[in-house]
Amino acid sequence: MKLSAAIKVYGNPKEIHACFEPELADEKRSNFKIIQKKDHVLFEIEAEDSVALRATLNSITKLITVYEKIGGL
């Protein structure tokens, strides 16, 4: 079963994109693209199964959490 999800993150798109660029990799079970827009970044996630989708979503949201906490310093 193929699954997909999209996440929009508002803030500084250039900075957010730069934070996630090293995370881009062509994985077998899931991968994601980062699309930089004017006022947000769009993450397009595709996965072969729900476990891979959840793992990718967790990775993205954990890094977003770190980005938010650093921004508050």
Image (tube, rainbow, N blue to C red):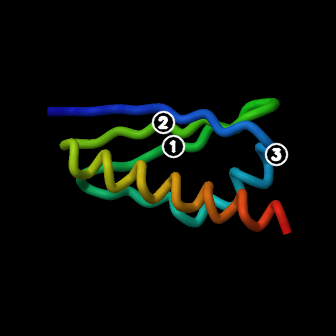
Label 3 CA crowd tier, 10 Å (few <14, some 14–19, many 20+): some
Q: Is the residue 70 above or below the residue 20 in the image?
A: below
Q: Which of the two discs, 3 and 1, labels the residue nearer the N terminus?
A: 3
User: Toward the viewer: 47 or 67?
Assistant: 67
Label 1 CA crowd tier, 10 Å (few <14, some 14–19, many 20+): some
State the image coordinates of residue 22 (x, y, percent, origin top left).
Answer: 58, 66
Q: Amino acid at mark 3?
A: Asn
Q: Nearer the viewer, mark 3 or mark 1?
A: 3
User: Toward the viewer: 35 or 66?
Assistant: 66
Name the image quarter holding residue 34. Answer: top right
* Alpha carbon distance from label 3 to label 1: 17 Å
* Alpha carbon distance from label 1 to label 2: 5 Å
Question: Which disc, if any, is residue 44?
Answer: 2
Q: Amino acid at mark 2?
A: Glu
Q: Which residue is mark 1?
A: 33
Disc 2 on helix, strand or loop? Answer: strand
User: Toward the viewer: 70 or 13?
Assistant: 70
Disc 1 on helix, strand or loop? Answer: strand
Residue found 60% across the figure and 35% down from its top: 42
Label 2 CA crowd tier, 10 Å (few <14, some 14–19, many 20+): some
Q: Are marks 1 and 2 in contact (CB under 8 Å)?
A: yes
Q: Which residue is mark 3?
A: 12
* Alpha carbon distance from label 3 to label 2: 18 Å
State the image coordinates of residue 71 (x, y, percent, origin top left).
Answer: 81, 61
> Is 62 displayed left or right of 25 in the figure?
right
State the image coordinates of residue 53 (x, y, percent, origin top left).
Answer: 31, 45
State the image coordinates of residue 14 (x, y, percent, origin top left).
Answer: 79, 48
Residue found 72% across the figure and 52% down from its top: 16
Residue found 81% across the figure and 30% down from its top: 38
Disc 3 on helix, strand or loop? Answer: loop
Residue found 14% across the figure and 33% down from its top: 1
